[in-house]
Image: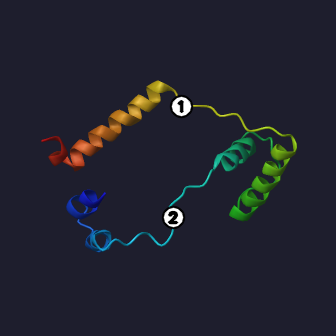
């Protein structure tokens, strides 16, 4: 990580913080957006009549849905991305990496 921030991004402040042993003040843990995606897709398909145009409305609907799912003692099904699409994403990522950081491939 140090090499990336200091040599490639040339982010001086971050590089200095790494050298000084400082860590981020907040953890960068992503949130699960599955319920939000589920609600928005259901809205697009006409399965939900409530308005979901504002973030607070989505948050309230998400809490309600989570409660119902927990009451039913079940989980939402997961659909995995097809391998062909994952391979396309990986190839695009490699192309971009080679374009932006050619020295990594010398």
Mark 2, Cα crowd under 10 Å, few <14 / some 14-19 / many 20+, is few
Q: Which residue is mark 2?
A: 27
36 up-or-down from 18: above or below: above
Dot 1 alpha-carbon crowd within 10 angstroms: few under 14, some 14 to 19, many 20 or more:
few
- Say if mark 1 contacts mark 2, CB within 8 Å: no
Q: How many circles with numbers are drawn on the protein? A: 2
Lower position in the chain sequence, tag 1 or tag 2: 2
When the figure is inspected, residue 74 is found, relative to residue 14, above or below; the finding is above
Residue 12, numbered circle: none
Quadrant of the drawing holding the N terminus: bottom left
Furthest toward the front, the residue is 21
Q: Which mark is residue 81?
A: 1
Can residue 51 be seen?
no
Quadrant in which the C terminus is drawn: top left
Name the residue at 27% across, 39% down.
95
Task: Using the rendered image of the protein, determine whether residue 90 is visible from the camera's viewpoint.
Answer: yes
Q: Helix, strand, or loop for circle 1?
A: loop
Q: Position of residue 12 (x, y in %)?
A: 25, 72
Question: Residue 102, percent across and down?
Answer: 17, 46
Which residue is located at x 86 percent, y 40 percent?
Answer: 72
96 left or right of 67 in image: left
Q: Is residue 87 above or below residue 4?
A: above
**Foreground mark, 1 or 2?**
2
Residue at 34 percent of width and 40 percent of height: 93
Rounded to the nearest angstrom, the CA distance separating label 1 from label 2 is 27 Å
- Left or right of 101: which side holds 45? right
Identify the residue at horizontal 34%, vertical 71% (top origin).
21
Rendering coords of residue 6 (x, y %): 23, 64
Residue 17 versus residue 62 in the image, above or below: below
Query: Quadrant of the rendered structure where residue 86 is?
Result: top left
Report helix, strand or loop for mark 2.
Answer: loop
């Amino acid at each position: 990580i140090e090499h990336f921030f200091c040599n490639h991004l040339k982010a001086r402040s971050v590089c200095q913080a790494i050298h000084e042993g400082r860590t981020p003040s907040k953890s960068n843990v992503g949130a699960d957006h599955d319920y939000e995606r589920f609600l928005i897709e259901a809205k697009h398909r006409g399965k939900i009549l409530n308005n979901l145009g504002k973030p607070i409305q989505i948050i309230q609907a998400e809490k309600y849905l989570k409660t119902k799912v927990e009451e039913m003692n079940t989980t939402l099904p997961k659909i995995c991305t097809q391998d062909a699409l994952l391979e396309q994403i990986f190839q695009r990522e490699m192309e971009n990496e080679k374009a932006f950081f050619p020295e990594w491939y010398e």
